[in-house]
């Protein structure tokens, strides 16, 4: 079928009219060519069993108006090419990949500890047991997520390397994702981890003081939950705007969530997350609509069928799924590629 369609479109090349040698007419002719290639690619992907990528192609076809979608299309072409390359990596090489990731975790932990020791923290007036630092991934939270994704592959003797990194970055979201990974790896840890989480929640609610300061304020992060409150506000606003905005099937387009959050932030009594929705599935819904959600389901469903209790790859993927509900690891150039590799390995 795809061969016949390719033959048909190749034979009809002369039908791509260019009325005048002008930038507008030339751009229009190029767009027809790109849409033709995109159509053939979408049909080929669906025929090859890559339904999630075919739905992404369909979304671009339905939403195409001008060259504004070129950047989005190029990004998804890169994602598809990366997926194909990873799927052809020999199975035994994935062990080497995990060791390379662990070496990267050791480096990130070293950067965090060095920063905590050498940087000037005189501007921080709150007394604490250590300072919150970051590695080379942009923020403490994203660095902590890197530790979370690599933790399921770590042998017992590597945990003294990860533990200082987790403490220096001090992300509750990362620790929740780590808990999910550990429970999947060893279900018997579920009760102790749940008790630990309850103890932390009670310590925050009860707020006992130590030397005149709330107990959790002594951690590098502090005990503020304003960030989680702000994310909840963004979640409600995105859902309401998606439902009432008139773009339920195709969404508002790439980058629209970031613009909407910046606009809403100017009208709220608190600072909202800047740049991203901090909820990857919800951002897909807002920007790509129900077609994007269908693509997400088509991507996730085969992975869920291959999850096995005790498998470190499955544990890392579940940790990433948990993290994506409160942040944007899939959109980060390092964490997103790690999750893509993990997903390709599972299927």
Image (spheres, grey):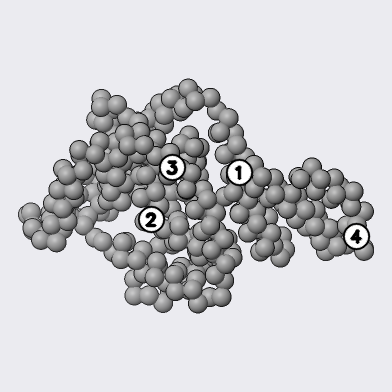
> Upstream in the sequence, badge 2 or badge 3?
3
Tell me the mark number nearer the camera, choosing from 3 and 4: 3
Quick one: 88 or 267, which is closer to the camera?
88
SS of the residue under disc 4: loop
**x and y, in percent, of residue 200 in the image:** 16, 52
Label annotation for residue 90 = none
> Mark 1 and mark 2: span between their CA atoms?
27 Å
> Upstream in the sequence, badge 1 or badge 3?
1
Contact between marks 3 and 4 (CB within 8 A): the answer is: no
Query: Quick one: label 4, few (<14), some, or many (20+) residues within 10 Å?
Result: few
> Mark 1 and mark 3: span between their CA atoms?
16 Å
The mark tally for this picture is 4
> Could you tell me which quadrant the N terminus lies in?
top right
**x and y, in percent, of residue 52 in the image:** 57, 50
Horizontal side of residue 197 vs 48, given as left or right: left
Label annotation for residue 325 = 2
> Upstream in the sequence, badge 4 or badge 2?
4
Contact between marks 1 and 4 (CB within 8 A): the answer is: no
Q: Quadrant of residue 86?
A: top right
């Amino acid at each position: 079928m795809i061969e016949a369609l390719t033959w048909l479109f190749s034979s009809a090349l002369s039908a791509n009219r260019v009325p005048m040698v002008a930038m507008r007419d030339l751009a229009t002719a190029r767009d027809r060519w790109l849409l033709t290639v995109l159509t053939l690619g979408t049909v080929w992907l669906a025929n090859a069993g890559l339904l999630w990528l075919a739905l992404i192609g369909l979304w671009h076809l339905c939403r195409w108006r001008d060259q504004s979608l070129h950047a989005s299309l190029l990004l998804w072409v890169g994602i598809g090419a990366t997926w194909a390359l990873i799927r052809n990596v020999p199975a035994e090489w994935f062990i080497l990949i995990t060791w390379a990731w662990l070496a990267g975790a050791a480096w990130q932990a070293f950067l965090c500890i060095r920063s905590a020791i050498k940087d000037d923290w005189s501007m921080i007036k709150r007394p604490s047991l250590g300072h919150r630092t970051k590695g080379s991934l942009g923020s403490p939270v994203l660095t902590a997520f890197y530790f979370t994704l690599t933790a399921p592959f770590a042998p017992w003797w590597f945990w003294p390397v990860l533990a200082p990194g987790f403490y220096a970055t001090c992300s509750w979201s990362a620790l929740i994702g780590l808990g999910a990974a550990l429970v999947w790896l060893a279900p018997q840890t579920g009760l102790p981890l749940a008790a630990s989480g309850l103890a932390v929640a009670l310590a925050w609610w009860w707020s006992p003081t130590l030397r005149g300061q709330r107990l959790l304020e002594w951690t590098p992060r502090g005990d503020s939950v304003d960030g989680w409150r702000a994310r909840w506000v963004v979640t409600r606003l995105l859902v309401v705007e998606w439902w009432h905005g008139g773009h339920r099937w195709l969404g508002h387009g790439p980058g629209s969530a970031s613009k909407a959050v910046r606009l809403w932030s100017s009208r709220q009594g608190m600072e909202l997350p800047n740049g991203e929705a901090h909820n990857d599935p919800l951002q897909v819904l807002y920007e790509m609509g129900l077609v994007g959600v269908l693509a997400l389901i088509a991507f996730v469903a085969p992975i869920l069928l291959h999850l096995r209790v005790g498998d470190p790859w499955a544990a890392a993927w579940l940790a990433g799924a948990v993290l994506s509900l409160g942040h944007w690891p899939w959109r980060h150039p390092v964490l997103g590629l790690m999750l893509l590799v993990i997903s390709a390995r599972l299927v």
